[in-house]
Image (tube, rainbow, N blue to C red):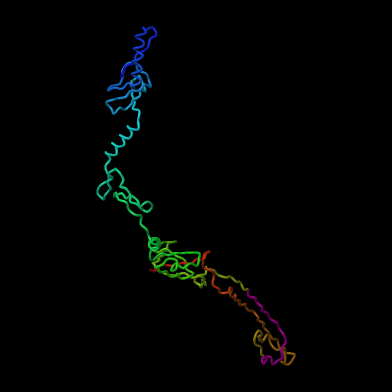
């Protein structure tokens, strides 16, 4: 029943009671019917649509007139049932086609922690790798492992083979590079360098040593009387004799003038002594020692 009348106190008793009775019947029936009421509308009033599975609607506005569904358990259950029936099964993706949304395939008992839903629409177990498989990925054959401990990777990781690398060597990347106009090439596996190095003469910076030596002139002459037989007087070394003038007439030719020449002019030679202990110098940068292993198998 969908009839609602305004009660007027001036109405006759029989008229007033009739209106009230119809109002009570309409409220009791929730204004049920196949159409919404159009008169005497009040926000908050409800209407049961008998043509819509007895769903109840509530008037939320009179301008414009707006009736909104009031969800009920039966309505929700019906909607869910209808919705589920309309959903297709989940379809996984392939390499050539996209998948389709739908119900996810039910997982099997025991798949609660090690399985995942793949994009192809199936449940797959997470791949469980052995320790060796992990090492094969992280340290394939030819890799280098360094450690500050004395652990042996041959013991740590079964079914792998490692050799300890040569001590005292640093690693240099293979390839070529140019420095100050000179190109250096390093081939894989090359070795070089030295811990300590002794400089050769060619490696010394070009330099010289200056020295000055003076020369002294020590020469002079003296004159003396020589006996007449001065010609027999001999001198050598820094002294030399020579006749000077004639014999004196008064001495019967027994005396004469003699010339003695002295020449001790000379120079000085000098030498510079060698310096240095000829030791090898440190040729390594600051370093920290570690154990280095190379995987061979």
Answer with the quarter of the image where residue 18 lies: top left
The spot of residue 80 in percent (x, y) is 31, 36
Residue 175 shows in this picture: no
Q: Residue at x 66, y 78 (%)?
A: 218
Q: Nearer the viewer, residue 266 or 138?
A: 138
**Is 220 colored magenta in this rendering?**
yes
Residue 91 position in % (x across, y down): 27, 46
Which residues lie in the magenta part? 214-233
In this view, 272 is above or below 38: below
Q: Residue at the location (69% across, 86% down)? A: 258
In the rendered image, the quadrant that contains the C terminus is: bottom left
Residue 113 can be seen in this image: yes
Q: Position of residue 295 (x, y in %)?
A: 41, 67
Residue at screen point 35% across, 33% down: 73
The quarter of the displayed image where residue 67 is located: top left
> Which sits in the foreground, 164 or 180?
164
Residue 130 against residue 12 in the figure, above or below: below
In the displayed structure, 282 sits above or below 64; it is below
In-image side of 167 versus 274 (left or right): left
Task: Give x and y (percent) for residue 61.
Answer: 36, 21
The one of 93 and 290 positioned closer to us in this rendering: 93
**How many labels were placed on the picture?**
0
Quarter holding residue 226: bottom right
Q: Is residue 27 magenta?
A: no
263 left or right, relative to 171? right
């Amino acid at each position: 029943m969908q009839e609602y009348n305004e009660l007027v106190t001036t109405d006759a008793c029989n008229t007033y009671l009739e209106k009230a009775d119809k109002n009570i019947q309409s409220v009791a029936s929730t204004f049920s019917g196949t159409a919404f009421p159009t008169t005497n509308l009040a926000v908050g009033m409800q209407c049961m649509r008998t043509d819509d599975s007895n769903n109840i609607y509530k008037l939320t506005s009179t301008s414009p007139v707006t009736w909104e569904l009031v969800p009920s358990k039966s309505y929700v259950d019906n909607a869910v049932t209808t919705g589920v029936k309309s959903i297709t099964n989940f379809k996984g993706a392939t390499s050539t086609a996209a998948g389709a949304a739908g119900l996810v395939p039910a997982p099997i008992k025991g798949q609660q922690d090690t399985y995942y839903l793949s994009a192809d629409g199936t449940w797959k177990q997470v791949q469980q790798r052995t320790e060796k498989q992990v090492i094969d990925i992280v340290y394939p054959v030819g890799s280098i492992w360094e450690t500050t401990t004395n652990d042996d990777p041959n013991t740590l990781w079964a079914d792998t083979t490692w050799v300890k690398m040569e001590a005292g060597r640093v690693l240099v990347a293979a390839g070529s590079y140019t420095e100050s106009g000179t190109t250096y090439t390093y081939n894989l596996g090359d070795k070089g360098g030295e811990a300590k190095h002794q400089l050769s003469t060619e490696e010394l910076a070009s330099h010289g040593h200056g020295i000055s030596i003076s020369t002294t002139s020590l020469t002079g002459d003296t004159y003396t009387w020589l006996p007449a037989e001065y010609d027999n007087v001999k001198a050598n070394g820094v002294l030399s004799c020579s006749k000077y003038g004639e014999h004196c007439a008064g001495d019967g030719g027994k005396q004469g003038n003699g010339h003695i020449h002295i020449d001790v002019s000379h120079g000085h030679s000098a030498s510079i002594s060698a310096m240095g202990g000829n030791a090898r110098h440190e040729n390594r940068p600051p370093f920290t020692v570690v154990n280095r292993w190379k995987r061979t198998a």
